[in-house]
Every structure is written in C-alpha cells, then in structure tokens.
Amino acid sequence: MLVVRLIEYDEFTFTDIIIKKFDTILQDNKSKVVWIDVLGLFRTDIIEEIGAKLGIHPLILEDVVNTSYQPKITFYENMIFLVLKFLSYDESVKEIKSEHISFVLSKNFLVTFQEIEDDTFHYVYERIVRENSRIRKRTVDYLFYALINLVIENYAKVLYQIGSEIEELESKVLTTNDKENLKHILKLKNDIVFLRKTLRPLREILFQLGDVESDFFQEANKIYLRDLRDHGNQVLILLDELNESVTVIYEVYMSVINNKMNEVMKILTIVATIFIPLTFIVGLYGMNFKYMPELELHWAYPAVLIIMASIGLSMVLYFKRKNWF
Amino acid sequence: MLVVRLIEYDEFTFTDIIIKKFDTILQDNKSKVVWIDVLGLFRTDIIEEIGAKLGIHPLILEDVVNTSYQPKITFYENMIFLVLKFLSYDESVKEIKSEHISFVLSKNFLVTFQEIEDDTFHYVYERIVRENSRIRKRTVDYLFYALINLVIENYAKVLYQIGSEIEELESKVLTTNDKENLKHILKLKNDIVFLRKTLRPLREILFQLGDVESDFFQEANKIYLRDLRDHGNQVLILLDELNESVTVIYEVYMSVINNKMNEVMKILTIVATIFIPLTFIVGLYGMNFKYMPELELHWAYPAVLIIMASIGLSMVLYFKRKNWF
Amino acid sequence: MLVVRLIEYDEFTFTDIIIKKFDTILQDNKSKVVWIDVLGLFRTDIIEEIGAKLGIHPLILEDVVNTSYQPKITFYENMIFLVLKFLSYDESVKEIKSEHISFVLSKNFLVTFQEIEDDTFHYVYERIVRENSRIRKRTVDYLFYALINLVIENYAKVLYQIGSEIEELESKVLTTNDKENLKHILKLKNDIVFLRKTLRPLREILFQLGDVESDFFQEANKIYLRDLRDHGNQVLILLDELNESVTVIYEVYMSVINNKMNEVMKILTIVATIFIPLTFIVGLYGMNFKYMPELELHWAYPAVLIIMASIGLSMVLYFKRKNWF
Amino acid sequence: MLVVRLIEYDEFTFTDIIIKKFDTILQDNKSKVVWIDVLGLFRTDIIEEIGAKLGIHPLILEDVVNTSYQPKITFYENMIFLVLKFLSYDESVKEIKSEHISFVLSKNFLVTFQEIEDDTFHYVYERIVRENSRIRKRTVDYLFYALINLVIENYAKVLYQIGSEIEELESKVLTTNDKENLKHILKLKNDIVFLRKTLRPLREILFQLGDVESDFFQEANKIYLRDLRDHGNQVLILLDELNESVTVIYEVYMSVINNKMNEVMKILTIVATIFIPLTFIVGLYGMNFKYMPELELHWAYPAVLIIMASIGLSMVLYFKRKNWF
Amino acid sequence: MLVVRLIEYDEFTFTDIIIKKFDTILQDNKSKVVWIDVLGLFRTDIIEEIGAKLGIHPLILEDVVNTSYQPKITFYENMIFLVLKFLSYDESVKEIKSEHISFVLSKNFLVTFQEIEDDTFHYVYERIVRENSRIRKRTVDYLFYALINLVIENYAKVLYQIGSEIEELESKVLTTNDKENLKHILKLKNDIVFLRKTLRPLREILFQLGDVESDFFQEANKIYLRDLRDHGNQVLILLDELNESVTVIYEVYMSVINNKMNEVMKILTIVATIFIPLTFIVGLYGMNFKYMPELELHWAYPAVLIIMASIGLSMVLYFKRKNWF
C-alpha cells in the first residue's frame, strides 16, 4: 500500500498525519516546514495526482517511478529534483540493497518518494520529533540537507562493510585454496561495479548543489551544502580504494594459483625424475635374454642396488641444490 | 525503392502523403509541423534533388548517405544537422543491428533520412496520428526531441538485453567449461567495442544540443533537451557498467581455466607419485639375477606387499594433509 | 631529384610549370591561386632558397626537412605552418607507409613539401585540371582544405584496411593454432602504436585550425574547416576501436593457448592415470619371489585381467563424469 | 590524557604553557603569534569547549575528531580548516603509520589538533625556541606554512623508504623464489593503495591554498605557499613512480613463476621422454612368451643395449638442439 | 672542485673567465649578455654567496642543490627559475645518466648550475665562441632558449637510443628464449618509469614558459619559446610510444613463454601417451602366472608386436590429426 505522510513542524509545533485526499495537501502555511513523504511507488495514478497538486512537471514524475534510473539532479525554475539510491548492506547474505529515492525541493515544501514502505529516513524523523533539536529551528532546505546527509552516511557505512569483507578475504586468499575464493572475488568485483555505477554521479550532483546560485538555500545553510560535497568526495575516495584493493586481491589470487601449480608440478617432477630411470634399470635386468653375463655374477645384485641408490641420491641432491624442497 | 513521405500536422489536421515530385515539397505553410521522412539512401540523385530544394548544403548530404559515418552534430546558421545510429538487438541471433539515421532541423521543417525502408520511427508516428496526443499540440522542435528520445530509449533497451546476456554468461562461466564460453566472451567484447564507438559521441552531441543558444527551440521545450541529456548520460553509465562486467567475466574465465588446469595436474601428480615408486619396487623383484637372496625367503612376498601398501598409504595421507582432495 | 612545380589557376585559366630559378616565383598575381608544390626534401639548399624567397622563417624550414617530426600546426602572423604524415597501406606486404608532408599557407599562396617525388596530391590536382570543378572557383584556402581532406581520407582508408586485417585474424585465432598468429598480433600492435603516435596530434591540430580567428580563411570556407574537424574525429574514433579490437584478439589468443594447454594436460592425465596403476599390477605379478601362492592358481590370470579391466573402466567413467572427454 | 599547549612568541619573547581552563585562551594579544596545540582527540567535550571559545563551527569539530576522514581543506570567511595525515614509516616492522592532524588558521591564531600525544611538530617547535630563527620573525601564517611543510617533507621521507624497499625486493624477485616475495608484493601494493588514498587530495588542497585571494597570508609569505605546491607535486610524482615500479615488480614476479614452471616441465619432459620408451623396450624382452627367437641369440643383449643407448643419445641431442639445456 | 665561469659577449666581443671572488660578479654591463655558469653543487656555502650577490631567494638555492628534485618552473617578479634534468645515454652499459641542472634567468643575466663539472653546455658554448653566429647577435633570453633546446634535443636523442634498444629486443624475444630477455624487459620498464617521472613535468613547464606575459623575452624571440613547446611535445609523444612498445614486448614475452610451455607439454604427452599403454602390455606378458595359455602359443609374440605397433601408429595418427606436430 502506498502511504503519503504529511509532516509539518516549526520550533514549537509538530504534526504528522497520513493523508488520503490531496486537495488540502498545501495550506499555504509558510511559517512551518512542510515535508510530504511518499512511501511506495507502484500507484502511478496517485503519484500523478500528488504531482499535479504540487505543480511537479510530468517529466519529473516519470523519473520518480522509474527505479532503473541512476542518480541525477535537475534544476528547474521553482524546484530542485534529485534522484539518489539509498544503499544498505545485509550482513547475513553479504548483499548490497538499493532503494530508489527522489527529492523534490520547492521553496515551501519538500517531497520525498521512497521505493519501499520501510521508512528509510527514520533517523532524521526522530531528530525532528525531539523538541529542541537543531533541525526544528531550521528551514526546509536544512531538512533537505539532513536527508541527503543520511543517505551519504549510509554509503560510507556500506563501503566500510565491504572494506572489512575485502580485508577478510585478503588473508583467506593467501592461506587457503578454497574454491569459494574465486566466487567471492567475483561477487566483490560485481559489488564494486554496481557501487561505481551508483555513486559516480555523486560528485557532479553535489558539486552542482553546492554551486547553485538560487534562493532555495538560506545563506546560513550553504555551509552544509559544502559539507555534503566533502562527504561525497570522501565516499568516492573510499570507493576508489576498495576498487584498487579488489584488483590487488585478484592478482594475488592468480599468483597463488600459479604458485600452487608450480608446487604440484615440482612434486610430480621430483618423483618421476627419480623413479623413471630407476624403473628402467630394474626393467633392464628383468629381460629374459639367455646370454646376459651380469645375471650370473654373485655381486651383481648388490652392485645394481648401490648404483641405483647413488643415482636416486644424486637426483635428490640436485633438486635440493635447486631449492625445490 | 526510396520513399519520400511528407507528413504535415497541427492540433486539428493531419496529412501523410508519399511524394514523387519535389517542386511542391515546401508550401510555406508555417502554421503546420512539416516532417519529410526519407526512407532508403541508395538513390543519391534523388537525395541531392531534395537537398537542393530544401537548401541543404552538399557537405551535409555527403554525410547523410555515408553510412560508415559515426554520430555527430553540426550547427549551421539556419539548420541543425544530426547523425545518429538506430540500434536494435535481434534476440534470435544475439546480434546488434545498426541503422544510419540523419536529421536536418530547420525552423520550418524536419527532414529525417533512414538507411532502411522499415519505418524505425513507427512509434512516434502513431502518437502523431492519435488526435489529442501531446505531440500534435507542439512545434517541430518537439517532434525532433521525440524522435531522438526514441533512438536513445532503444539504446537503453539494447543495453539491457546485452546486460542480461552477460548475467547469463556469468553463471555459465563458473559452472560449465564449455568451449563456447570463450567465443561468447569474445562476441560480447566486440559488441561492447562497437557500442562504445557508436555511443561515445552521444555525450558531446547532447551536451551541445542542450546548450544551443538559438531560436530553433521554443523556451518551453528546452526542458526536453535537458531530459535528453540526462537520458544520454544514463545510457553511457550503463555502457560503462557493461564494459566492466565483461572484463570481470573474462578474468573469471581465465581463473576458472587456471583452476581446472590445477585440478588436472593434481590428479596426475597424485596417481603418478603413488604408483611410480611402487612400480619401481615390483620391477626390482622382477629382475633375473641369479643371486637375490630375498627371493628365496618365505615371508618376502607378503613383506613387500605390506611395505608397498604403507608407502601408498603415507602418500595418500600426505596429499590429504595438503588438502589436495 | 627535387622538383618544384608552380601551379597557378583561376576559374578560367590554369598553368603548371616546373621552375628552376626562384626569382620569379611570386609575381604578385593576386587574382590567381598560387600553389608551389615541392617534391623531395633532400636538397636543403634549394629549400632554403625557396624559403628565403617566400619569406618563410628558418625554424619552419628545419621542421620541413626533419622527417622524424610528428604532425603539428603553428600559427605565425602571416603564415600557417602545418606538418602531417601521409599514410598509405601496401596490401601486398601489409605495411603502413608514411610520408612527411608540410604545408605553408600564406594569404597569397600555398607551398607544399612532399618527402617523396610520387605525387601524393594527384587526386586533387586532377580536380584542378578539370575546367568547371568547384575547386577552380575557390580561393587558396579551399585548396589547402582539399589537400588536408585528401590526407585525412587516406587515414580512414588505411584504418579500414587494418580493420579488415584484424577481422581476418580474429577468426584465425579461434580456429588455428598457427604460430604465425602471435607474430601477426605483434605486428598489428606495433601498427596501432605507430598510428596512435601519428594521428593523436590530429584532434588538436584540426581543433586549432577550425578555431582560428584570422583572415586566412574566407567566411564561406570556414564550414569546410569544421568538416575537417569532424572527419578527424571520425578517424580517431575508428583508431580507438581498432586498438580495442587488437587488445581483445590478444586476450583471446592467450585464452586459446591456455585452453590448448588444458586439453593437452587432460589427455596426458587420462592416459597416465589409467595405465600407471595397471602397470604396477602387472609388475607385481612379474616378481620372481619363490613363494607367491597366487601364481599357482588356475583362475588367477583371468581374475587379474578382470580386475584390471574394471579398474580401467571405472577410471574412464570417472573422467567421463568429470566431462573431460 | 588530552593536553592543550598554548605557545606564544614574537621576535623577542617566547612562552609555552599547558592550559587547563580555557577562559583566558585568547587574550587578544595581536602582536604575538598564538599557537594552540591540542594533543589527543578522545575528549570530545574538551575539544568542543575549546572550539566554542575560539568560535570554531561545530561541523569543523566533527571532522577534527573523526580520524577516518581523508585530507581536505575548507575555506570559511574568517578561518581556514585543513585536515592532513602525518605519515611515518616504522623501519623495524616496515609499516606506514598515519596520524590524523587538523589545522584551524584564523587571522590571530593557529590551532592544531594531533591524534597522538607524541609531539609530531617537534622539529618546528625547536626552531621556534631558538631565539634568532627565521620563524620567530614572521607571522602566524608562516608558522602554518612551516608545519605543513614538515608534514609534506615526511611524506617524501616515507616515499623514499618505500622506494628503497621496492628496489630491494626487485633484485630478490629475480634471484630467489622465496614464497615471501608474493606476500611482500601484496604488502607494497596495499601500501601504495593507502598512500594514494591519503596523498591524492594533496594536489587540490595545495592548489587551493596557493590560490587563495584572502588576507590570511602576508604578501611576502605567498612565495612559501607556492613552494608548498611544488613540494606537493614532487611527492605525487614520486608516488606515481612507486606505483609503476610495484606494477613492474608484480609483472616480473609472474614472469619468473612462469619461467620456473617452464623449467620444471622441461626437466620432467626430458627425463620422461628419454626413459619411458627405453622402459618399454626392456619390458618387451621381459615378456615370458615361449617362442621369442631373439631371446636365444648370443648377441641380442648387447644389440639391445646399443639400440637403447643410441635412442637415448639421439633424444639428448634433440633436446640440446632445441636449446632445452 | 666547484668552478664558476663568467661569460660575457655581444656581437663583437667575447670574454670567458673563471672567477674566485664574487664581489665584481655583476658590473652592470647592460649592453652585453652575461652568463654565469656554475659547475658542481657540493659547496653550498659558495652557492649561497653567489645567490646573495645576485639577489636569488634562499628557497631557490635550496632547490638548486637538492638533486633529488624533479623538473619544475617558478616565476618570480624579477626572475624565472627552472629546474631540468640533463639526460644522456651510455651505450656501453645501456644506462641513462641524469644530471640536475638549474637556470635562473633575470633581465640582465643568466645563471646556470650544473651538477657535474663536465660542461654539458659545450655545444652551445662553441656557437657563442664562433664570431658571426646567430647567438652572438641576440639577447640573454635567446641564450636561455638555446640551452633549454640543447637539453630537449638530448632527450630526443636518448629516446631514440632507447627506441632502437627496444626494437632489437623485440626480434630477440620472438626467436630466442634467453633468460636475459626478462631482465632486459625489466630494465627497459624501469628506464621508462624513470623517463616518465623526469619528462612528464615538461609539458607544463614549456606551456607556462610559452605563455608568460612578461618582459623577460623579446617579442622577436617568443617564436623560439613556441618552438621549444613543440619540441617538448614531440619528446613526450615519443615517450608514450616507447612505453606502449615495451608493454607490447612484455605481452609477447609472456605469450612466447606460454607457447613454449605448450610445446614442452605436447612432447611429454605424445611420448607418454604412446608408450605408457604399450609398457602395460609388455608388463602383462611379463607376469609369472603358471596358467597363461597365450604364452605357449607359437604366434603370440608376433601377434602382440603387431597389436602394439598398430596401437602406437594410431596414436601417432591421432596426434597428427590434432596438428600437434
């Protein structure tokens, strides 16, 4: 079920209602911060109705519901439209989950569209509920900042979790020859490809946001936009590092496989090289020729034994000198 | 056969005729949208004739008919010339098909040149036919936008199809050792090389289009140009992701081959290392020396069997301890 | 022998003479296009003499005769100096040939210096000879454009030929294990390295040429400079594609070698793993111990044969189940 | 324990006290350089108190104590905030150590926050103590420069140490086949990844610092900012070189492993190829058929010996001709 | 020993003296070109004395004597400071030698600092000595140009020598399997890493030099700065090409090793696959069972021989059909 919540607050008052009819969605209450939080995207008709009421361009609404869309920002004359992905990391299955989130910021209100009904913005919501929190004293653009900041902080969290997964794998790759390692590397590489696709637009988005010359943002709040940009850069630096680390692990994995193969071949070669010639010798004296004078000699058998022992020994010494074992 | 269609429409009227003589091609009917759709490129003489009538520079016409040309945009004083490739993906043979498409936008008309007679723009055409569609209420620049948008949406479609092909292959590469896998990777790599060649100019083209300071575009329609740019970026991000994914698959493929080889060598080494020394021992007592005292002993045969069994067993334990099987 | 041709033409007249004395090289005939075409570079003294007569800076002349120089463009107050390489592809030996070509464009004349006496500009020359060709009606800057265009079209031709060489090799690499393949890949890689060195400066050169704010070019001809820039970009996109294709081929080549090795090792392992244990068994009953009770048994020989057959068979089944053959 | 030192100096006086109460932290003593050096970051309350007293924005203080933060610079109206990492290299364990360091430069004072209580800035401190050192005659912005310079010089030192570690490893990789080599390469790769993450923001930071159009810096001291930028570039060039060197080592390592494998396989192949056919021959004459006429011949045994010797010899010659040993 | 030479010249006069006392180093002789050439850097005190006399900033002098410093340029109000590396290639040991060289250009004089006493600038010096050379007629900025040009020409020379070394190696890698090849590739890779570190700053340096808006350079000489920039670009294009060539060689080397291994494995597999089954057969009839009816048959021995021959032959045909030899 699609839920539309209307949250209104200022320093002293706070209301949070679930609305069904959208006629009264904006009561031109300029003194309060108005946040319309839409949870669920599957009822396109309702979203179109809300959009029409709030004067949101149909092109925006198309991008709101199209969850295959990548992060982007577009500036309109009286609105800022921002698409982000909310990422979380499910430790139990080691999987990154992505939720499509859109923001429409106008001078009077902020609308957020969340793909899933779980309230992703819970943490900011709680700060609003608390009576004398900073957020209650500020305008709607600060709310906008706080929500984006929450999203970016979750990126950092996900990256740190992937990072510790990588570190764990790194020591495994060197010690065990588990076939799972390759699958794990593949999974991490795909994670990184996904994260790069999702986070790469961030730099541009935050740069544009920090640069905007409009009156959407109070002068005193512009410092927070710069802060967002810094946070975004930190996330991207971290991502670059993860990417390089996975590449290193892959190379190490390949080297370890090659080393193992080398090892295997050495064992085979040592054993075969020692015993194949000796087997030839014993085969030689197993021949049934009538006239083989050696066979009659008393000391022949011990002599052959000694010769073979010295051949074997010299082989062993040869491999030892070659540092093969 | 080359076909020239002349489509004229406004909010209330719509005509679509196939024209043979080009004298009357433009009747200076400024109130209607005029779209001249040329299907087929092989009759250079006719194209030159049309070009002359419409005042299109010969250099443009050269690029219209040269299908080896890559996408590009050129701005002339009174015209915009755009070359794109229309891509489609034939699921049955898993092949990307490319069609050379050119647009000439002037203030009064739009000319499109299609390489193949099949009407690629079918979907937009149907929207024009419908009486109260948005497109009927707009000017020629909106038609231009709608057609380009169609082309870009097809890019996205092709990329998604290639994407699912890649995902399919990814699971195959890990489980089966089919020789087809290499051919498939090669095919995908070539697809990506082709797509990069074809789509890379897109960013520049759409950037220039969105930036143009001219009166080709109605102010109200400029929002659509920005939308095109966003769509183009999405396509290019997707393409980057596909490229990275194919690289990952290739690396996995190489690792799997290496792992297989390792496996094979291990089996060979285990078998050879256990039996070659034992074969030496049995060969030893197969020698025909007259004086081999052991041969006469009653308990010699069982003793040798026991010795060999313990050698074999200790080898097996050694390999087990090394985690070889 | 160094040849200096003086070609003068306008819409109605055309003269082409070989000059020996350079006093009269410029007769200040402003109404005609003057093209001085120098074939051969080895007579530095003559080139210096011509340069002095035409007022060309000694630094330019140094670059004209230094054939190891890479393409570049330099703008002087009253001259444009352009160095390009004319490329051609000798199908018979599959080799790229490069000729050092310099252009000096002043407002009144164009001087071209060609490394080889063969007239590379033959095709443009023929157009000039034809009486009512477009080139005859235009000024010297159009001649300049036409010659550069010729050079760039030859780049495209060479790239297409290399491209078809690559495609040919691609199918070969997958099917035959010819040792020639590696040499061919190496040769193509070197070709690409050479082409990148030679063509990379093109983007910058054509960009600068199209951007020049001077009166060297007639306003009506500037459209041709933009056309050059487009052509240059096309060539560079093509080159990128070739480069990527060769990389793909190399990777495929490496995979094929690895696959082959895998194959070889499998055959060895199958044969050795089946027969080495069996050889041990037959060796066992070849021992000459006096007391080996089995040897006396009537059914021992067929029993051993059956045991060995079942060992061999189970091995074969094992490898079959592993999909080894 | 968190320590707060207040250092004040001018050309003639110098005081250094540890302060406990922060009321009197700034006595508006404009003629002296004021440096507040905070050692240790774990008492967030104290840091907040200091920040409040000095008018430092809470967003800055968050970044001061968050040691996972990467280097960055932010310009405020009346302050410059800079985060750097102080690197040192522990020779004994061959490990890079990183300390989180923040600078807040205002027009009247400089505050530094160090993660560890060890005084990292010892070397600059000593220069201040010396009575007629250059630093004593200069303003607070020169102190700021001197401290950053110290940090960057330590980067160079660490890079040189990593560089000599790499050179050492390079010769090892070619000569010994120590398994430690791979671990060492992995460790160096991780070092480089870490260094790139830490130092990459440097270029941007120093560029912005050198470009700042403010009155934080005395005109005469701006030359030092440019000097910092040069030093920073040197460090980054060095880092690029190290990165390339490690890549080269890794490739050499892989080649060496491949070469070793080749060697091993050659030995196995030579021995097996010579003796397996010979063993077949001796096995042949070990058969117990009743009717094997050769067995009765007087010269058969020496003949077989000669045949086998010549087979073995020709094999040896074959491998010699192939340059296998 | 550190030597300081004072060279003064104009079109008609020339003096070259070695000076010991630096009081009279500048006699404000504006009509002549003054070049102070300092050979050797180890006497920091003398260099500081010279610097003080000429008004050179201490920061510059630090960089002059610090030979680990990379190339850079810094513009001061009344001076240009340039650091370059003079490269030469010692053919006998195939080694690149690098010398640290600094230039300080003021409006009245040029100071050069050379790391080694050998006069690197010999070639320019000789041109100055010659009475009616161009350099004698020009100002100090032309001398500056001439010296830098000499340095860059030497870069080109070194790169050509490395280039021919690479070409030589390329043919070796394909034909011989010399272990030296890997060492040689490693050496070349390190050379390239070193050259990239040293030459990469060149582009920026020459760009800034050509762009400078100062009165250091006579208008008529600015053409030479542009010429330097062109030369620098040529050198960097060449370096890129060398880098790509070495990468190609490395890949070919790896392919050759892999091919060799394949070859080796094939020989082993052919021999083992043919003879191991045959050895089993002969072992079979070497068993000592009492009841083996075949042994008694007259035609058994030749029958077994024929069977074995046909097994061997069919194996050989199998491998032939697989194109293994």
Image (spheres, coloured by chain):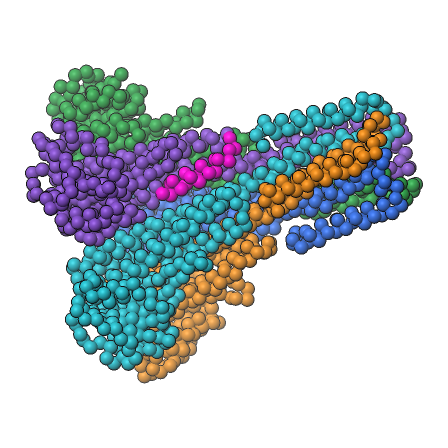
Chain colours: A purple, B cyan, C orange, D green, E blue
The answer to whether B244 appears left or right of A65 in the picture is right
Which residue occupies the foreground of this view, B234 or D239?
Answer: B234
Q: Quadrant of residue D238?
A: top left
Which residue occupies the foreground of this view, E36 or B27?
Answer: B27
Residue A114 position, x and y percent, is 24, 41
Q: Is residue A163 visible?
A: no
Residue D251 position, x and y percent, is 50, 41
Q: Quadrant of residue A265?
A: top right
Which residue occupies the foreground of this view, D16 or D187?
Answer: D187
Residue positioned 85% across, 27% down in the render: C290
Question: In the displayed structure, would residue B156 be above or below residue C57?
Answer: above
Residue D151 position, x and y percent, is 31, 30
Q: Does D106 appear in magenta?
A: no
Question: In the displayed structure, would residue D325 be above or below residue B117?
Answer: above
Q: Is residue B198 visible?
A: yes
Q: Main secondary structure of the magenta part?
A: helix
Q: Quadrant of residue A142?
A: top left
Residue positioned 20% across, 36% down in the render: A146
Q: Does A179 appear in magenta?
A: yes
Number of marks drawn: 0
Residue positioned 44% across, 38% down in the render: A185
Which residue occupies the foreground of this view, E108 or E278?
Answer: E278
Residue positioned 25% across, 70% down in the render: B35
The answer to whether B31 appears left or right of D295 in the picture is left
Residue A319 position, x and y percent, is 66, 31
Which segment did they paint magenta? Answer: A176-194
